[in-house]
Image: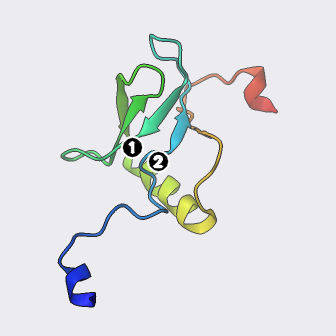
Amino acid sequence: MTAQLAMFPSTVSSASVIGLAVKLPRPCWCGSMVATIGSSAGPHHARLQCAGCETHRGWLSRDSYEFIVAVVDEFGRPEQPITIRFPNSHNSADDQL
């Protein structure tokens, strides 16, 4: 049985960041602030897709990707969206809580 299992590639582990929700500092044109982390493509580590309208929102930086992977590996998958901030983004009063 073990030899048969070795014939198939492994699936995404439960600790993977694929499918995690992230809150972005700027809304999509549809108004959603939440995006879903998707698979990589070419030199990119992971894509960000709008949770509201599925529009491509951008790419997750290598540093952000590696940080999120390390946090998920250490503490497990979060139940709430992870807030991503850019160096020059302004936070609302809600983010200060």
Position in image of residue 72 (x %, y %): 55, 60
Q: Is residue 44 left or right of residue 93?
A: left
Tell me what residue is drawn at x 29 percent, y 69 percent: 10
Q: Is residue 72 above or below residue 93?
A: below
Classed neighbour count for the residue bearing mark 2: other residues with Cα under 10 Å, few (<14), some (14–19), many (≥20): few
x and y, in percent, of residue 31 in the image:
53, 12
Extreme residue in the front direction: 1
Disc 1 secondary structure class: loop
Q: Choose between 93 and 1: the one closer to the eye.
A: 1
Looking at the picture, tell me which residue is in the foreground, 86 or 59. Answer: 59
**Residue visible at 27% across and 88% down?**
1
In the image, is 92 to the left or to the right of 74?
Answer: right
Which residue is labeled 1 in the image? 61
Toward the bottom, the furthest residue is 2
Q: Identify which amino acid the numbered label 1 is placed on.
A: Ser
Q: In front: 16, or 63?
A: 16
Secondary structure type for disc 2: helix
Say which amino acid is labelled 2.
Ser
**Mark 1 and mark 2: span between their CA atoms?**
5 Å
The residue that mark 2 highlights is 64
* Residue located 27% across and 89% down the image: 2
Q: Callout 1 environment at 10 Å: few (<14), some (14 to 19), or many (20+)?
A: few
Asked whether 64 or 13 is in front, the reply is: 13
